[in-house]
Image: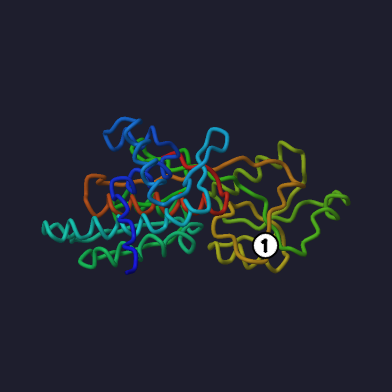
Amino acid sequence: MEKIPVSLDSDALRSFVLGIECGSFALAAQQLCRSTSAVSAQLKKLEQQCGMALVTKRGRHLALTPGGEILLSYARRLLSLNDEAWRAVRGELLQGDVRIGMQEDFGESLMPGILGPFSRQHPSVRISARVDRNQPLLQAMAEQSLDMALLWQGDNLPAQSEVLGQTPLAWIGAQEFDISALLARNDPLPLVMFEAPCLMRSRALCVLEQAELDWRVVFTSHSLSGIWAAVRAGLGITLRSQIGLPAGLHSLNALLPAVGNMGIALWQHNADDAAQQMLAQLTRRALADDIHHNGNGTVSM
């Protein structure tokens, strides 16, 4: 007779997932209204059920073991199905409309992992999505033509917006772009930039001015796809994060001045709305996954 598989404890799975997303099981315990020792006991039980360690300490931070990485993906799917079933039985399937905006850097890389699962779980919710630059999204939020937006953190974000994390910025160029030769000749750096106002453009020019490096804007675009096309063509370099970085481009940070990090923020008009809450949760998870798998920064949620 075939051995019956162990049934993983759903409460322990929830503590495990939340602990990884928070970067701390102590913070997870607070959100779950449990003691830290109770959450630690749940993690130990889960490791016993799986027959292996799931997390390890890396300095001050938690890191997943190979087994933990596998379990995390399954745990999220199991909990999602569990929660969907619970809402369906109680007659609480979500309905209504949500208008969400995303900055272009996040649109292609993060949006499919957010909207796909949400639509499958909540087919009665109508979603309209807008991918645009920061300033138009901020204006749309101010005019309340969007319900929520994932944005770069700038000075003009409202106090109620939630900073989800930080991602390092990078000077980016084509693989064949010879930045060393250009610097050796003291030639002005050819820049591929968005039109002003642009947070990345302002950061790039400020850093270069402080480093006393000459520069010139050789290509200006209205869209991120135009930026990537010009950089791939070798027209110059740009400053972005590595979230959604196209193939054939790479970081030039080793040869150019440090440019620091940029915050990522979520602005919602009605954080108590159930559909927005669910979309916000999926957004946090998608960002945490990208940061964890690609080393694209730190999560502060």
Q: Is residue 286 left or right of residue 260?
A: left
**Figure quadrant of residue 232:** bottom right
Dot 1 falls on a residue whose secondary structure is: strand
Q: Amino acid at mark 1?
A: Leu
Measuring from the top left, give residue 126's x and y in whole percent.
24, 65
Closest to the observer: 256 or 21?
21
Residue furthest right as drawn: 185
Measuring from the top left, give residue 26's x and y in whole percent.
38, 32
Residue at the spot of label 1: 249
Q: Residue at x 38, y 45 (%)?
A: 16
Q: Is residue 155 left or right of residue 229?
A: left
Closest to the observer: 282 or 75?
75
Closest to the observer: 83 or 131?
83
Give the position of the C terminus as an image quadrant: top left
**Figure quadrant of residue 129:** bottom left
Q: Residue at x 71, y 42 (%)?
A: 208
**Figure quadrant of residue 282:** bottom left
Measuring from the top left, give residue 211's x and y in whole percent.
74, 38
Q: Residue at x 74, y 63 (%)?
A: 175
Give the position of the N terminus as an image quadrant: bottom left
